């Protein structure tokens, strides 16, 4: 019976992200379903699927809910106090990954199941690569899901390079390199940064010599990417710049750095941030904050989850969110130190480095809302890190 539940749940997890990709690749296909864009339809599907598996089936989850309960309860109570349709939507988007993590932690993971999961992720990655090649390279069109593609690939890359560090099999290193090509072609700077973080700082890479070697390769890769024509043209207004002209603060980047329009975003949020620093302005109160910039009632995003969460939920909300990340990180790290199972060790080490990548993405993206592309998968891995494994402590094949 559990086999049917397991494969049923994960077939939804791995297939639903393809729906927005396919529709974005072929614009003649419907791009909306009623009031929802296709991406919205995708996360609503996963919400329904998760509710079914979470409440209708007898799964006993081992997810570390104590770390995330303060955040989820805060969201739920705030919604009851300040209810709106869009506030409900945002609340469900934020809580859904936690529910998916609880669901994933309720299954028992055998070697067969884990290998099937990884192969399924690779198949989805191949399909995304084909759609990307067709639309962007062959048809000369805009890259489908250009903002979220690197996020999805980050998860696959973390598992792939983690397997390489554990097995030393070069096909997994080559797989990581192939996965990293798309962010490089798109020249998505946070995507590139996340890929480099995963490569250099992955916790599965434990040998001192290996760490030094990887660190040196990483430094060379950073140097090559920084001096590439694509990076220079996208990062500096004159198409050429040096390291001293870079700024981590893209709201005050200086005269030469290009932030893709983000430099002027903060001024639209400053008043609300200062007026309600502790509890924020209410769920999804940031929806139309930049309508004067875009014109009309156009929904807007901060492209910075730290600012978005602060604006809606204040420092208290942001603190509870970061508490969940911090406690999950340290708890998983403690488990990793004493873990003997190679499969669980791979999951735990990937959760650790993906937590760092997640926090980096949050600085310039809306990754908390990209549930089906990254956040759901991240919380699934957290669930796996605490779930029951039946792999006989075997080595990864």
Image: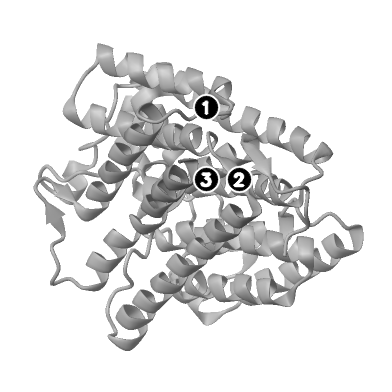
Q: Is residue 156 above or below residue 143?
A: above
Q: Earlier in the sequence, mark 3 or mark 1?
A: 1
Q: Nearer the viewer, mark 2 or mark 3?
A: 2
Kindly state the secondary structure of the residue where label 3 is placed: helix
Is 268 on the left-hand or right-hand side of 389? left
Q: Earlier in the sequence, mark 1 or mark 2?
A: 1
Disc 3: CA contacts within 10 A as few (<14), some (14-19) or many (>=20)? many
Quadrant that contains the N terminus: top left
Circle on res. 109 = 2
Which quadrant would the C terminus be assigned to in this image?
bottom right
Question: How far apart are the two marked residues, 2 and 3, measured between alpha carbons?
Answer: 17 Å
Query: x and y percent of residue 257 in the render?
Result: 48, 62
Q: CA distance from mark 3 to mark 1?
A: 20 Å
Question: Image quadrant of residue 97?
Answer: top left
**Residue 255, placed above or below residue 141:** above
Check the image and report above or below for 20 versus 295: below
Residue located beneath label 1 in the image: 60
User: Which one is in front, 383 or 27?
Assistant: 383
Identify which residue is drawn at 36% across, 84% down.
137
Q: Circle 1 — which element?
A: loop
In percent of width and height, residue 26 lies at: 21, 73
Bin the neighbour count of mark 1 within 10 Å (Cα to Cα): few under 14, some 14-19, many 20 and up: some
Q: Which mark is residue 378?
A: 3
Q: For the point 21% across and 47% down, which residue is it? A: 293
Q: Is residue 257 visible?
A: no
Question: Mark 1 and mark 2: span between their CA atoms?
Answer: 13 Å
């Amino acid at each position: 019976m559990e086999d049917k539940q397991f494969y049923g749940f994960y077939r939804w997890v791995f297939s639903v992200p393809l729906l927005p990709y396919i529709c974005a690749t072929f614009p003649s296909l419907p791009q909306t379903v009623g009031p929802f864009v296709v991406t919205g339809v995708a996360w609503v599907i996963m919400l329904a699927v998760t509710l079914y598996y979470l409440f209708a089936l007898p799964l006993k989850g081992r997810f570390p809910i104590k770390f995330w309960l303060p955040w989820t309860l805060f969201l739920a109570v705030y919604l009851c106090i300040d209810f709106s349709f869009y506030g409900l939507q945002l609340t469900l988007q934020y809580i859904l990954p936690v529910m998916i993590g609880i669901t994933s932690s309720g299954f028992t993971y055998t070697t067969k199941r884990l290998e099937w999961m990884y192969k399924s992720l690779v198949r989805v990655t191949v399909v995304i690569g084909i759609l990307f090649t067709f639309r962007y390279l062959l048809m000369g069109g805009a890259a489908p899901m250009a903002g979220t593609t690197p996020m999805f690939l980050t998860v696959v890359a973390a598992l792939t390079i983690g397997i390489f560090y554990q097995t030393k099999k070069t096909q997994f290193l080559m797989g990581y390199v192939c996965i990293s090509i798309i962010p490089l072609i798109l020249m998505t700077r946070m995507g590139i940064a996340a890929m480099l973080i995963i490569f250099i700082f992955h916790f599965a890479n434990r040998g001192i010599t290996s760490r030094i070697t990887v660190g040196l390769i990483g430094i060379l890769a950073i140097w090559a990417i920084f001096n590439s024509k694509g990076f220079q043209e996208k990062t500096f207004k004159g198409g050429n710049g040096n390291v001293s002209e870079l700024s981590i603060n893209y709201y005050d980047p200086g005269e030469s750095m290009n932030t893709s329009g983000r430099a002027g975003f903060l001024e639209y949020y400053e008043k609300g941030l200062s007026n309600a620093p502790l509890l924020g302005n209410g769920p999804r109160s940031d929806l139309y904050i930049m309508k004067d910039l875009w014109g009309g009632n156009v929904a807007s995003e901060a492209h910075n989850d730290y600012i978005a969460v602060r604006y809606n939920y204040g420092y208290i909300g942001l603190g509870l969110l970061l508490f969940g990340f911090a406690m999950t990180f340290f708890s998983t790290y403690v488990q990793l130190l004493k873990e003997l199972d190679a499969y669980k060790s791979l999951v735990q080490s990937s959760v650790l480095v993906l937590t760092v990548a997640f926090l980096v993405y949050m600085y310039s993206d809306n990754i908390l809302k990209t549930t089906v592309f990254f956040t759901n998968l991240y919380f699934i891995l957290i669930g796996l890190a605490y779930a029951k494994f039946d792999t006989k402590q075997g080595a990864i094949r």
